[in-house]
């Protein structure tokens, strides 16, 4: 906090993402755009797929009643076999 005790204004949310050149993140970002994943995976209650914004590291509830942490293993399985990791 500032020395005068005031509360600073909230920081704006960064919605644009630019991964490092040549990284796996860049390749994933390129595929996400190329395969039009954002058409279903967007922060919209009417979207066909769940929003991916802020997903990493959270606990998700699946349709079978179990929960999982959205880590590397979860994301790998959810991408490779999407019907195996359907969120509730």
Image (cartoon, helix red, strand yellow):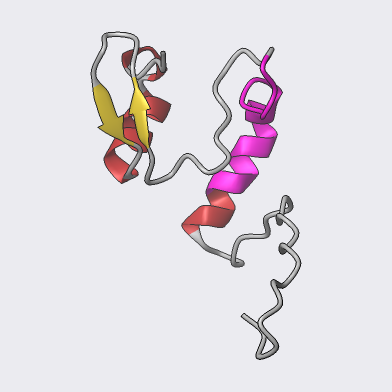
Q: In front here: 56 or 29? A: 56
The residue under the point 54% across, 23% down is 50
- In the picture provided, is 80 more to the left or to the right than 18? left
In percent of width and height, residue 83 lies at 38, 12
In percent of width and height, residue 47 lies at 66, 16
The residue under the point 72% across, 64% down is 11
Q: In front here: 2 or 84? A: 2
The residue under the point 66% across, 82% down is 5
Q: In front here: 55 or 23? A: 55
In percent of width and height, residue 73 lies at 27, 39
Quarter of the image with the N terminus in it: bottom right
Placement of 41 over or under 22, stated as above or below: above
In percent of width and height, residue 85 lies at 34, 19
Q: Is residue 63 one of those drawn in magenta?
A: no
Placement of 44 over or under 4, stated as above or below: above
Q: Quadrant of residue 38?
A: top right
Q: Residue furthest bottom?
A: 3
Q: Quadrant of residue 20?
A: bottom right
Q: Is residue 42 one of those drawn in magenta?
A: yes
The residue under the point 27% across, 9% down is 64
Start and end of the magenta stretch? 28-45
Quarter of the image with the C terminus in it: top left
Placement of 21 over or under 46, stated as above or below: below
Q: Quadrant of residue 76?
A: top left
């Amino acid at each position: 906090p500032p020395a005068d005790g005031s509360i600073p204004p909230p920081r704006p949310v960064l919605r644009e993402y630019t991964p490092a050149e040549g990284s796996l993140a860049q390749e994933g970002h390129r595929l996400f755009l190329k395969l039009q994943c954002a058409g279903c995976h967007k922060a919209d209650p009417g979207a066909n797929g769940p929003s991916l914004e802020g997903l990493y590291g959270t606990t998700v509830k699946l349709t079978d009643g179990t929960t999982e942490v959205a880590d590397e293993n979860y994301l790998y399985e959810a991408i490779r076999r999407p019907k195996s990791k359907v969120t509730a």
